[in-house]
Amino acid sequence: MAVTMNALKLNGRPPSLLYHRPRLIIVRAFSALLSPPSKAVVYDQQGPPDAVTRVVELPPVEMKENDVCVRMLAAPINPSDINRIEGVYPVRPPVPAVGGYEGVGEVYSLGSAVKDLSLGDWVIPSPPSSGTWQTYVVKEQSVWHKVNKDSPVEYAATVTVNPLSALRMLEDFTTLNSGDSIVQNGATSIVGQCIIQLAKYRGIHSINIIRDRAGSDEAKEMLKQLGADEVFTEGQLEVKNVKGLLTNVPEPALGFNCVGGNFATLILKFLRQGGTMVTYGGMSKKPVTVSASSFIFKDLSLRGFWLQKWLTSDKAKECRHMIDYLLRLAKEGKLKYEMELVPFDNFHVALDKALGKLGSHPKQVLTF
Ligand SMILES: NC(=O)c1ccc[n+]([C@@H]2O[C@H](COP(=O)([O-])OP(=O)(O)OC[C@H]3O[C@@H](n4cnc5c(N)ncnc54)[C@H](OP(=O)(O)O)[C@@H]3O)[C@@H](O)[C@H]2O)c1
């Protein structure tokens, strides 16, 4: 049975693509359980994602007894996926690789030793792991976390990387009590939208900074609907005393920096004496600069957050509880964020939107 050789000839892909999936090229017996061929976004080298990614059909994978084959339903394009492909992320899969890091799918077939999952179950890789931008994913059973099938599919696909980061960052740096406030930039990001809502449930006010762009008035309104107390564009904060703009919101002790550059400086201006700024993203690709006076007169602290590091510190079980909690909130309509669902066949249009080449767009979520 020459499935893989035929597939290789049919697809005309370089043989090197197969080398990182060694199980693909050995078809031992007719009784072996094989996954279906998988349509996948692959990259053979690091570089600009729109230049190095292509959609190919990968041949079937021979499944081991503990493997689960999942038919993907939805997976987002996150900034960290782009960073992995560009090669700027410190931890990335060896190339050639399939893109994507989180997503949701339904169980399509099971290895003979799999006990806790059934055909049709909805599962997410938890902790998340590489290779979700493809129609069929085969991974060992312990990778998969079963989620309720009544979860909205786009939230199940996106719950881990961004909402979980928002939840952790509200917990891990400063004790926040009802009535306190936080300040953040990049408030229109999924992380930002989740911070607003998760803070609000605890009675914590949010001061939000967004960029000046077409549609910023609508973006402000959207964030206020989610529970934001204050929303400013960068341009509105070109004043001597930014705190003078606050009405009925106390000075924040904690700030979240998604963007860098001047957006980070604005957070420092809002923070109260002894406050902390946590940097978790670098969307502007500009460095964080801090005045000497921020340290000398305000004694501010600068910290960083990286979900991937947190997940490797023996947190897998805790992570799954938090995911279930966040999905319950999403199902109840208490956690919302903007997404655009895009058929997988339009991957490269979705990628261009995620790269910002077509202006500002909501989170792109591929549907399979
Ligand atoms: N450290 C961690 O563990 C961790 C975990 C999760 C996410 N992150 C990081 O968090 C950030 C947000 O991720 P996300 O998935 O929530 O974002 P997202 O939903 O994809 O939204 C992108 C955000 O970036 C803003 N943006 C894009 N280009 C920009 C630029 N040149 N200057 C200023 N703002 C710009 C967008 O603003 P507009 O609305 O104006 O377009 C939007 O707010 C990313 O940097 C991501 O890597 C880090």
Image (tube, helix red, strand yellow):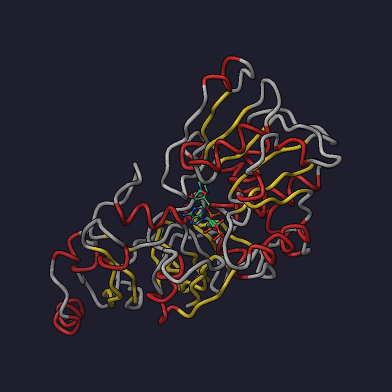
Q: Quadrant of residue 112?
A: bottom left
**Is 214 displayed left or right of 218 in the figure?**
left
**Is 202 displayed left or right of 56 in the figure?**
right
Q: Nearer the viewer, residue 85 or 247?
A: 247
Residue 214 percent coordinates (x, y): 58, 67
Residue 109 percent coordinates (x, y): 45, 72
Residue 40 vertical position relative to residue 66 in the rendered view, above or below: below
Residue 116 vertical position relative to residue 55 in the rendered view, above or below: above
Residue 34 percent coordinates (x, y): 32, 73
Report the residue that reaches farthest toward the top: 296
Residue 180 vertical position relative to residue 220 in the rendered view, above or below: above
Residue 56 percent coordinates (x, y): 27, 76
**Is 351 displayed left or right of 251 in the figure?**
left
Report the residue that reaches farthest toward the front: 240
**Looking at the figure, which quarter contains the N terminus?**
bottom left
What residue is drawn where x is 56% and y is 60%? 158
Q: Nearer the viewer, residue 133 or 69?
A: 133
What residue is drawn where x is 48% and y is 80%? 343
Q: Nearer the viewer, residue 250 or 43?
A: 250
Q: Quadrant of residue 353?
A: bottom left
Report the number of discs. 0
Q: Is residue 328 visible?
A: no
Q: Is residue 42 visible?
A: yes
Q: Nearer the viewer, residue 316 or 190?
A: 190
What residue is drawn where x is 66% and y is 69%? 152
